[in-house]
Amino acid sequence: MSQSAPTTIDALPTGTALSHYAITGLIGQGGFGVVYLARDTRTNRTLAIKEFLPTAIAGRIADGRVVPLSTEMANAYSYGLKGFLREANLLAEFAHPALVAVHQAWEQNDTAYMAMQYYPGKTLREVRVRMTARPTEAQIQQWMSPVFDAVAELHAHRVIHRDISPDNILVMAAGETVLLDLGAARQVLGGMTQALTTILKPGFAPIEQYVEDGSMEQGRWTDVYGLAAVIYFLVTGKPPTPATSRIVRDSMPPLATLAPQNMYSAAFSAAVAKALSLRAIDRFKSMAEFRTALGWVPQRKPQAAPTERTSQAVALSADEVGALLTPSSGASDLSDVLPASMAERRGTEQEYKNAASKSTGVKIVAAIGVALIVIAVFILFRR
Ligand SMILES: Nc1ncnc2c1ncn2[C@@H]1O[C@H](COP(=O)(O)OP(=O)(O)O)[C@@H](O)[C@H]1O
Ligand SMILES: [Mg+2]
């Protein structure tokens, strides 16, 4: 840090006006920014506002503005600021229940802000750290399945998240999860200012994210690794060995050796191991492939998800009711079992409809065939 660094006053105080919002509290402060609790003065709605404040290269001065710590850092700061705005504007284009909803991004105080929906909850890391027992496979699916959907939605629009970790997934009271924070701003800043190793979350970033020369391409497989790393963390309580160590000597125990077989299926452990392959080519190429290998339900159309979840009453079969009542189902409560079994049932119904329409078609063709034969025989005999 430079000697001529301005005096830094970190977070803005409660009551500060930002655009048409008023700061009402502080949610969190990291090396790249500050997240405030705020109120929309027009609607009175509570929301969260993130401010770009990379403390390694910039600080706040008395009038509230954020300035680079030195002239040499001005370039990095302006690149980082652009990255932050790009991330905010990119996120604002998406509307997915499991992806942070960004309402607005703007520049003020010589820095930038994004106003987002406020999600009261804890990060997945906090939730896991507080647990005394491993989460069941059904619980992991309940948390991660919406996140898989959100990432698939990003991928469908050619956006790679690049920063999937338990710190960037919020869990709310009813267990719903939301994915935060695209890695864009960090990456831009990382390249400019410091070693990537301090920017990336060790254990959750695949090897291609450490290579700056572009020789190892990043793509959907990069997020596949991040998601698998989160699942590995949920099962074992520890992040996977950092990819930089694994590339020298891969001593990371595969999930199957750490996960009790009576809790996690062989398919689940094998899928996580494959998704955590060091070489991108050995991983799944898409979220759909990964999901199928895990044995999780097929992807649903994101837009249709809320109506399906809330308005469709699905009757359970006797077997499903039995499974719910038997402790050996491996799930800790009803909510662990219901979503999966309901969705499976939807899948079955769809397959059934497809099969039924196919068999109707076959019947019609057969009937026409029989009719033609009867007519031919009739004509022959008349002669
Ligand atoms: N919209 C939000 N609602 C509630 N809490 C949030 C929200 N956005 C961020 N947070 C909290 O602030 C922390 C940091 O936010 P994040 O967007 O991940 O920024 P960064 O990782 O760049 O510091 C999160 O881990 C979460 O605890
Ligand atoms: Mg974050």
Image (cartoon, rainbow, N blue to C red):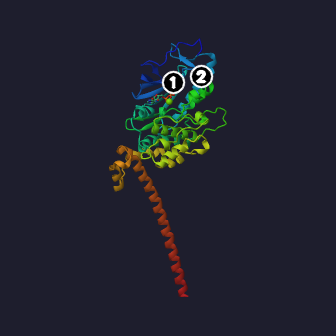
The quadrant of the rendering that contains the C terminus is bottom right
Quarter placement of the N terminus:
top right
Q: Position of residue 154 (x, y in %)?
A: 54, 40
Q: Is residue 158 visible?
A: no
Of the two numbered discs 2 and 1 on the same chain, state the one appearing first in sequence: 1
Task: Give the tally of numbered discs.
Answer: 2
Of residues 246 and 376, the one nearer the viewer is 246
* Amino acid residing under circle 1: Gly
Which amino acid type corresponds to the residue marked 2 in the rendered image? Tyr
- Are there few (<14), some (14-19), or many (20+) residues within 10 Å of tag 1? some
Considering only vertical position in the picture, is 25 above or below 88?
A: above
Above/below status of 351 relative to 258? below
> Which residue corresponds to the image point at 49% horizontal and 40% vertical from the top-left?
150
x and y percentages locating residue 331 in the rendered image: 38, 45
Residue 129 in which image quadrant: top left
Residue tagged 2? 77
Identity of the residue furthest to the bottom in this view: 383
> Is residue 365 or residue 209 the one in the foreground?
209
Q: Is residue 187 visible?
A: yes
Pointer 1 residue: 33
Question: Residue at point 42% right, 50% down?
Answer: 343
- Rendered location of residue 110, percent (x, y): 55, 20
Mark 2 CB within 8 Å of ligand 1: no
Q: Are marks 2 and 1 in contact (CB under 8 Å)?
A: no
Q: Is 215 placed left or right of 18 in the picture?
A: right
**Disc 2 from disc 1: Cα separation:** 12 Å
What is the secondary structure assignment of the residue under circle 2? helix
Q: Is residue 166 above or below residue 13?
A: below
Q: Position of residue 173 (x, y in %)?
A: 37, 35
Q: Quadrant of residue 137?
A: top left
Q: Is residue 204 above or below residue 18?
A: below
Whether ligand 1 has any atom under 8 Å from the Cβ at mark 1 is answered as yes
